[in-house]
């Protein structure tokens, strides 16, 4: 962290903040381990995660309760109760698709009321039509539907208002550290605003200006000033020492190496990103969510990639776990046949274990069916491709061409080491080599690695361009969604019949 500082208003209030920035060091989460916790691990449930997931759980509960009360009191008495209870999951699903669970700094149930009402109308009309089609005796009067829609919307708004009030109370009592990124006219105004309005739960701990030259003379420092961070190393140190959970941008992130490194750093530490008064276009990598959010009058929109959507990440992890478990059970006979074939053709040692690099640059042990016994550990770690190796048996060659040798990686998915879809993991030797040669290669580790990925379904597997693979992988991370994962899995399943392999 540099000694350069910028003055902040309200010296008395900022004095304690400044001292905390310079001296307080928070131990890394999970003991001595560096970097963020693995996807799906319990270490990911830090204070920020608990608050974020707690608010999400509160909104989900509010929506379900509003529907349950409406269905219990206002639904026609002859409608089947068990079916109505089962349909309690419909409102949260519709609200999630509409984006009503997105992170918001200044939530307002009244602003969301039109969307809540429209979705409630769609929901009750669909329920009425389905029941009437099943049995004409369940046909509902339009007045029942109208009353149910109005009541559910009102109850939902009231319950959400209570959740937002609880969030503001919690944020005021336990503010989280925030960095202000950019040196514009808004920088000092935002700092003062966050000090004056504790209900946002943001405590400024530093200003970031990566582009500022280190040779620029530092202004006189005083006890009420915040540190000015001028390098990614300074920012990384501040993020770790102060447990920074938010980064507020006063201008859209630039498309250059320094900005990309800064964004990757924030993504690695799971910081929420916000753009204030973002009238200019945002780069393709960082998408802007629609809404009417503001920070005490400053227009603000969340900046996020695929990694900054907690509900979608939860869906991804749930999909990974469910599909991997089902496939492992259903494919048990195939796994047994493959293991027996390897044992007969190539002798003992059915499984091949190899160190690979996963999320956040952390190593893990990848499992495969052994298709070739390497001469030594050095060959295993540094030899690029063995597709044409004559030592490979017919069984090993068949397993590789059908990709059946990858099936044990489903266990890696269940463990949380990998995802079904993501950038393919590589060995440490090649990660180091490629990171120095190809720009953006290291950024692939922002997302959990996968058994298959966008690059693979586009034919980039085996001895193909690393630069193109990194380009596809980073594009997948920037535009990721659960639906895209399902599309990639479907394309992977069809590609198995073409006997590609590597």
Image: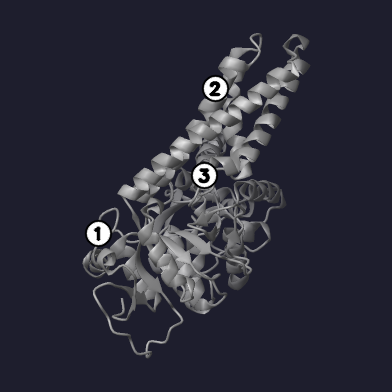
- Answer few, some or many: residues within 10 Å of disc 2's Cα (few below 14, many 20 plus, some between 14 and 19): some
Q: Is residue 72 above or below residue 352?
A: above
Measured in 3D between alpha carbons, the distance from the residue under mark 3 to the one under mark 2, in whole angstroms, is 22 Å
* Secondary element at image label 1: loop
Q: Please state the horizontal and vertical placement of residue 34, each as a whole percent of the image.
A: 32, 61
Q: Is disc 1 surrounded by few (<14), some (14 to 19) or many (20+) residues within 10 Å?
A: some
Does 28 sit left or right of 426 as displayed? left
211 to the left or right of 98: left
In the depicted view, which residue is nearer to us: 410 or 382? 410
Circle 2 residue: 68
Q: Which residue is mark 3?
A: 311
Residue drawn at x 68%, y 53% as measured from the top left: 499
Q: Secondary structure at mark 2?
A: helix
Q: Residues within 10 Å of mark 3 (few under 14, many from 20)?
A: some
Q: Nearer the viewer, mark 2 or mark 1?
A: 2
Please tell me which residue is depicted at 31% across the width and 50% down the height of the picture: 174
Quadrant location of the C terminus?
bottom right
Q: Please, what secondary structure does the residue beneath circle 3 have?
A: helix
Residue 204 position, x and y percent, is 36, 64
Disc 2 and disc 1 in contact, CB within 8 angstroms? no
The quadrant in which residue 233 appears is bottom left
Front in this rendered view, residue 21 or 186? 186
Report the front residue among 30 and 285. Answer: 285
Q: Are marks 3 and 2 in contact (CB under 8 Å)?
A: no
Q: Which residue is mark 1?
A: 27
Q: Which corner quadrant of the image does residue 453 belong to?
A: bottom right
């Amino acid at each position: 962290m540099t000694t350069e500082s910028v003055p902040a208003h309200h010296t008395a209030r900022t004095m304690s903040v400044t001292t905390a920035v310079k001296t307080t060091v928070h131990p890394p989460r999970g003991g001595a381990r560096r970097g963020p916790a693995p996807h799906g691990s319990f270490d990911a449930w830090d204070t920020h995660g608990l608050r974020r997931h707690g608010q999400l759980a509160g909104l989900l509960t509010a929506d379900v309760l509003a529907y349950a009360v409406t269905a219990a009191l206002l639904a026609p008495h002859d409608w089947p109760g068990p079916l109505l209870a089962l349909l309690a999951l419909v409102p949260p699903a519709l609200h999630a698709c509409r984006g009503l669970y997105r992170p918001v700094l200044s939530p307002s149930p009244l602003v969301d009321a039109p969307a809540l009402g429209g979705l409630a109308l769609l929901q009750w009309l669909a329920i009425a039509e389905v029941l009437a089609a099943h049995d004409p005796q369940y046909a509902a009067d339009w007045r029942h539907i109208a009353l149910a829609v109005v009541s559910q919307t009102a109850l939902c708004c009231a319950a959400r208002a209570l959740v937002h009030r609880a969030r503001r109370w919690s944020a005021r009592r336990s503010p989280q550290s925030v960095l202000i990124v950019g040196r514009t006219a808004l920088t000092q105004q935002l700092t003062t605003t966050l000090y004056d309005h504790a209900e946002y739960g943001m405590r400024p701990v530093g200003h970031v200006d990566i582009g500022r030259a280190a040779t620029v003379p530092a202004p006189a420092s005083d006890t009420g000033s915040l540190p000015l961070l001028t390098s990614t190393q300074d920012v990384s140190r501040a993020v770790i020492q102060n447990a920074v959970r938010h980064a507020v941008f006063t201008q859209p992130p630039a498309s250059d190496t320094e900005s990309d490194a800064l964004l990757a750093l924030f993504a690695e530490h799971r910081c929420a990103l916000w753009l204030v008064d973002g009238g200019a276009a945002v780069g393709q990598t960082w998408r802007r969510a629609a809404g009417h959010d503001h920070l005490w009058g400053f227009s603000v929109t969340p900046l996020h990639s695929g990694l900054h959507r907690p509900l979608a990440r939860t869906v991804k992890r749930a999909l990974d776990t469910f599909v991997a478990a089902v496939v492992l059970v259903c494919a048990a006979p195939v796994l047994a046949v493959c293991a027996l074939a390897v044992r007969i053709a190539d002798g003992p040692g059915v499984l091949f274990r190899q160190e690979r690099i996963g999320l956040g640059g952390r190593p893990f042990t990848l499992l495969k069916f052994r298709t070739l016994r390497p001469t030594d550990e050095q060959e295993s770690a540094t030899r690029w491709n063995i597709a044409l190796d004559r030592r490979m048996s017919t069984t090993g060659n068949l397993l590789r061409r059908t990709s059946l040798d990858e099936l044990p990686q489903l266990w890696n998915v269940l463990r949380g080491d990998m995802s079904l879809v993501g950038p393919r993991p590589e060995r440490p030797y090649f990660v180091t080599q490629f990171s120095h040669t190809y720009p953006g290669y290291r950024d692939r580790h922002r997302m959990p690695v996968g058994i298959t990925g966008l690059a693979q379904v586009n034919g980039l597997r085996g001895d193909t361009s690393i630069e193109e693979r990194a380009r596809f992988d980073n594009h997948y991370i920037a535009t990721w969604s659960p639906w895209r994962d399902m599309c990639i899995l479907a394309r992977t399943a069809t590609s198995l019949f073409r006997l590609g392999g590597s």
